[in-house]
Every structure is written in C-alpha cells, then in structure tokens.
Amino acid sequence: MTKQPESESDRVIIFDTTLRDGEQSPGATLNADEKLTIARQLARLGVDVIEAGFPYSSRGDFDAVQQIAGKVGTPSGPIICGLARASEKDIKAAAEALKPAAKHRIHTFIATSDIHLEYKLKKSRKEVLQIAGEMVAYAKSFCDDIEFSPEDAGRSDPEFLYAVLERAIANGATTVNIPDTVGYTMPAEFGAIIKGIKENVPNIDRAVISVHGHDDLGVAVANFLESVKHGARQFECTINGIGERAGNASLEELVMALHVRRQYFNPFLGRSVDSTAPLTRVDTRQIYKTSRLVSSLTGMIVQPNKAIVGANAFAHESGIHQDGILKNKLTYEIMDAQSIGLTDNLIVLGKLSGRNAFRTRLVEIGIELSENDLNKAFLRFKDVADKKKEITDRDLEAIVNDEIKQAPEIFTLQRVQVSCGDPAQPTATVTIGMPGGEEATDAAIGTGPVDAIYKAINRVVDVPNELIEFSVQSVTAGIDALGEVTIRLKYNDRTYSGYAANTDIIVASAQAYINALNRLYAAQTKMEEAAASMKQPV
Ligand code: KIV
Ligand code: ZN
C-alpha cells in the first residue's frame, strides 16, 4: 500500500537562498523590486522558506526583506527568513525587517572551524560557544523560528561542532544548518558529518537538520543527496545554482533528483519504496519559468548543458539517440520536459490577439502582472507581434522579463541607427534621453555595429565602465526569433548587468547597455549620497 506523507518529517523542506547567498554572486545584484518579483515567483514555485536577504548589510537589503515579508509572507505563503551574524545589531535589524511576515525566521551564524576562529574572528572556541548560545537566545526573544549555522562546519572539529549545536538547540534553535562553506567536503564525508551530528548531539531531535553547500568541487548537490540518507531534512539551495564563487547547490537539480528518483529516496524518509507522494512541496512545472526569470534579472546566463534548465537539457542531437526517442522516449529520457514546465506550446498568440487573450495566456503560464505592468507588456507584445508572426510562451516570458525588469530609467534610448556591411565602416548614431529631460545625439565608428553603438552611447553618457561580458541568445528558433542580450559591466570592482529582448538584436544590444549603465549610475549615486550624509554633522 502507498503511504501518503503524514508529517513534515517525511518530506524535505526547500529553503531557497537565491535572494541572499545567490545574490552574492559577482554581478548578480538585484534591486528591491526585482527581489520582490523573484520572491513572488518563488512562492508560486512552492518553496517552503525564502531567505530574502541580509537586512543589516545595507539599507537597500533591509527594505527589500521588509517588502518581501509584507507582500509575499502571507499566512498561506512561505516562511520569510533574514540572515544575521551572531551579533545583536544584525539580529535586531533582521527581526525588524521580518516583522510584516505572517511566518518569519531569523537565521544567525558564526564560524566554528579553527581556521576561521584564528584568522577571521580571532576568538577562542570557548568564546564562540558562548556567543552562539547567547545570540540564539537573543534571536529567540524576537521570534520562535530560529535557524543557527556553524559556518565552515565542513572543516570544523566534529566534537566542537556537536557542542555548539547542542548549545544552540538548548537556547532555542529550531533548525540547525550545516554549511560546507568552501565546497571542500566529499559526499561520503558530508553524509558522515550528518550521521555524527544525529548520533552525538543529545538534543538533536528538537531541531530540523538543514544542509547548505557551495559547488567549488562540483559536488554540492551530491552532498545534499547523501545527507538526506542520514537525516538532513532541509536543503538550502538557489535557482540555477547561483551564489558565491562556483555557486550554491542548485534547487532544480535537487528537486528533480528527489522527484525522478523518488523510489530510491523514499525509504530514507520512512516511506514505502513505491510511495508516489512528492518528496517536496515544489510545483516542478514552475521550475523552468523561475530559472528564466532569475537568469534575466541577475544577468547570470545558464550554461546550455546545465542539468534540468540548460537549453540542451532535453535536446537529442545524435542520430542514434533521435532514432531511439522516436521509437520510445524512455530509451534516452529519464524525465519529461513538461514536468519542469517546458512545453512545446506551439503558436499561442499573434498580431490579432487582444489584451484579454494576452492576459489570459499569461495567467495560464503562471505570470500575474499588475495592471500597470500588464499595459506595458501588452504594448511590447503588440510591437513584437508586428514583426514576428507566432508568439510562443517563451517569447511571452522574454517580453515580460524585458518589460517589467526594474532597472531605473535615468538614461533612455530614444533612437539608434547603424550602418555596416562589407566593405563599410560600422557607424552608429544614438539619441539618448538625459536625466534632466533633454535629448543628446552623437555618433561613432567601431569594429562592428555593437561596438559602434556602445562607443556612441559612451560619447553621450559619461559613466566610466569596463564591458566584461556580452552575450546574445535566441529565445526560440526561426529567423524572426526574439534575441536576448545580456551584458555585464564592471566599475570599482562591482559588476552590473543589463538585459533586453527584441527581434532586432542591434536594438536589444543598445537597450541592454543602457539598462546596465542605469544600474551602475543609480548604485554610484546612492553610494555617493550615503558617503556625503555620513560627513554631515548630526
Ligand atoms: O556558506 C555559508 O556558510 C553561508 C552561511 C551564512 C550559512 O552562506
Ligand atoms: Zn553560503
């Protein structure tokens, strides 16, 4: 007989940290509105916990966490979590930012490895043990749901780790998270760490064991899947695996591994082998859309061969494979593309489709927009439909991502014109709307049309930067496909991304550059204002 899940203990809690650890990827900086857009999609995806940010780290992050707590942290929505170092100021800021959420969690951490104690914290084990206990208790004075992480647990002395975890649980931690901060641990070792914790921390039954890991050696997901066999019940992960350095464990890989190999994992969660009950609460059909949204808003492109969400993940190129698939899909496919929401939906809308059909289709594919965003997106849709006969779901997603992305509009692209060919010197003329409302026009020649455009824009917009990445991808096949351009700029060691979609890739290139410049300009202005206000006498 199939056993249905009866309690939280026979499924895995999905804790999404795209908006906190994921946002720590170089260049993935998101503004508060973009974070809110992603948080709403994470709620549709069905994650249990959203780690929305690190409120004490900046005013911007505090505001973003507060907005998400108020708008996404509804009684039926996910738990909203905020990160705090083990310090009163951090914890207080997190508690304050999280207040509007119906269900909230404070996640506090302190390092426990000797190398971190000696060089980073300059503290003894005794001091760290005491701080961990005191700060968990302090966090508990604000809310019941407390998560504690011993940072760099993977390289910590197990006996000390057990003592710190025991103290944290005794003082109120309801989840203890075990991070492989530097992505050093191998799967069998990570499994043994979890097993050791289960066996040696006397009060471990009073807390959920969570795992967190980075992908420096490419085994973060494997580590988590091993840990679940030994009692881990919460996975901390990010969409597309974005995060510090090589990234975090990828949500889509973990969820689909548990989904596709349910029979393998069932017994470790106390279920019968053949239980068909899902092992997570995630709606897998929302995975692809979430991946695309995160990629376009962060400017972090998904590699084509990435498991689950890469462009080639469901493509069969070799003749032998294609032949097998035609005879029976199961010959080479272990999961159905539709299970992650990748539909072959043919033509959905066209030039004659009205606003209502547009809205209805968006809702059908899970995109809900405010009236204002819907109007903006509909105008773009009409514009694209004039040039492209068949508008697919993937086009709709690109249009919406492009139209509702929240880059500040400081400089606006009014006109762009290029002439190029062979033989010809690529020349571009641009007209830019300036912050004061006036327009400025200039022209430049370059090594190619995009280079000429960027040089022309640079003559008008005086924002120093270094272009470090430029990429064009086609949304669907076909000569009239929408092209998506993603670029990344660097200035003062910070990276800023820009994204745009258009049937004309030259226009998309210009627009993406303007978007990135706007972000850079807005961030610099904010930093200068903050620096100036610190100099003012109080
Ligand atoms: O990688 C890490 O150790 C972290 C902690 C804050 C959980 O991100
Ligand atoms: Zn981390």
Image (cartoon, rainbow, N blue to C red):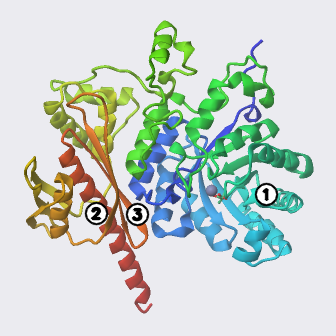
Residue flagged by tag 2: what amino acid is it? Leu
Q: Earlier in the sequence, mark 2 or mark 1?
A: 1
Residue flagged by tag 1: what amino acid is it? Gly
Ligand 2 under 8 Å from disc 3 Cβ: no
Q: Is residue 183 left or right of residue 524?
A: right
- Tally of numbered discs: 3
- Helix, strand or loop for disc 3: strand
Badge 1 local density, few (<14 within 10 Å), some, or many (20+)?
many
Ligand 2 under 8 Å from disc 2 Cβ: no
Question: Label 2, on which residue?
Answer: 517
Tag on residue 210? none
Q: Nearer the viewer, residue 326 or 145?
A: 326
Question: Label 1, on which residue?
Answer: 172
Q: Quadrant of residue 151?
A: bottom right
Residue found at x 18% / y 41%: 504
Q: Earlier in the sequence, mark 3 or mark 1?
A: 1
- Helix, strand or loop for disc 2: helix
Q: CA distance from mark 3 to mark 2?
A: 11 Å
Q: Quadrant of the C terminus?
A: bottom left
Residue flagged by tag 3: what amino acid is it? Thr
